[in-house]
Amino acid sequence: MIAGLEYLLGWLALAVSGARDILRVEFAPAGVPASLRLARAAGPDDWLPVDTLREVKLTHKVVEPYEGDRKPALSTLALELVLRSGRERLTPLPYNGDPQPLADALDALLAPAAVVVELRTERSTREEPRSNSAWR
């Protein structure tokens, strides 16, 4: 009985936290947006004036393989919105393209509202597995 209750509470906590996850950002009208809203798993937020948005930060992370590694590079893109009321982040997603056209499109869309769009690329190399000398 207790294990079932713990499972139910754990599932409920995951469902509630997942409901706040941002799925997409919507702008309206299409040409020169005056409003934006965050569409979440639980449903969209209310529309906000676009000047509520201060900055859009795109972080492109690329993890390159070490020499001799057979696994391909891993690339993700994360989006952070800096709003007057705080920060909102979208979960980083796999992204195998060039993020510059996306950053340029966001910059063109949001320039009339004086929203800063920043693109940062972070590169690293995957660590090579180390053998455990105690097991030799």
Image (spheres, rainbow, N blue to C red):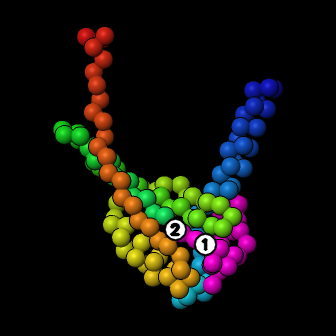
**In the picture, residue 9 is in which quadrant?**
top right
| Amino acid at the residue labelled 2 | Val
Q: What element does badge 1 sit on?
A: strand
Which residue sits at x=27%, y=33%? 128
Residue 39 visible in the current orientation: no
- Viewer-nearest residue: 76 or 41: 76
Residue 31: percent from left, percent from top: 53, 89
Which residue sits at x=53%, y=61%? 80
Mark 1 vs mark 2, CA separation in Å: 8 Å
Q: What segment carries the magenta color? A: 34-55
Q: What element does badge 2 sit on?
A: strand
Please say if the residues under marks 1 and 2 sit with CB atoms less than 8 Å apart. yes
Q: Which mark is residue 79?
A: none
Q: Is residue 52 magenta?
A: yes
Q: Is residue 127 left or right of residue 1?
A: left
**In the picture, residue 108 is in which quadrant?**
bottom left
